[in-house]
Image: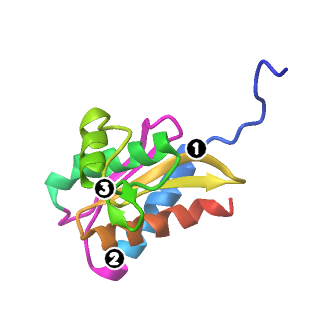
Amino acid sequence: MALITRNQAKLTLEGARAVVAAAQRRAEETRVPMNIAVVDDGGHLLAFERMDGAKPASIAISIVKAQAAAMRRAPTGPSMKGDQVNLPVALGLAVASPHQQTPIRGGVPLVTSGQVIGAIGVSAGTEDQDLDVAQAGAAAIENA
């Protein structure tokens, strides 16, 4: 039985900045200024950028999306029952554990070699725009 794990991949500040830069490039392409947060695998903030013109009200939402994606090791979004949103469960989980679940899309885990090393959260556009920008940011780290 192993008592410790060695050689575990960790997201660096340089890596977090690369994720933010990739997300920012995509946000510029879509012409929607975004709030972009990157956290480590424990949900602790490593990098944040509020692009000029991004909605101030979306700052906290971008951070929560990143934290939730990191802690759950899965993209953010509503709980589903089949192909339908399970609204009571989605909202109940978000209220019960706001830093571990949000029904709003736009939080994506950062994965390398099958291991979650952090997450990105994006907010200020539509959910589709937020998710698109977050996925562009996450792509910067996938092949690292």
Q: Which residues are magenta?
A: 28-54
Tag 3–tag 2 contact (CB < 8 Å) = no
Based on the picture, tell me whether residue 45 belongs to the magenta stretch. Answer: yes
Name the residue type under label 3: Asn
Residue for point 50% across, 59% down: 19
- Identify which residue, 22 or 101, lies in the foreground: 101
Q: Position of residue 108 (x, y in %)?
A: 46, 57
Residue for point 50% across, 34% down: 42
Name the residue type under label 2: Glu
Is 113 on the left-hand or right-hand side of 15? right
Disc 1 to disc 2, C-alpha distance? 24 Å
Residue for point 48% across, 43% down: 72
Q: Position of residue 97 (x, y in %)?
A: 32, 34
Based on the picture, tell me whether residue 11 belongs to the magenta stretch. Answer: no
Q: Quadrant of the C terminus?
A: bottom right
Residue assigned mark 3: 86
Name the residue type under label 1: Thr
- Identify which residue, 6 or 100, lies in the foreground: 100
N-terminal of the two: label 1 or label 2? 1
Residue assigned mark 2: 28
Disc 3 to disc 2, C-alpha distance? 34 Å
Determine whether 114 is above or below 40 in the image: below
Tag 1–tag 2 contact (CB < 8 Å) = no
Q: Position of residue 14 (x, y in %)?
A: 55, 50
Determine whether 49 is above or below 128 in the image: above
| Of labels 1 and 3, the one closer to you | 3
Residue assigned mark 1: 12
Is 31 on the left-hand or right-hand side of 112? left
Label 3 sits on a secondary structure element that is loop
Label 1 sits on a secondary structure element that is loop
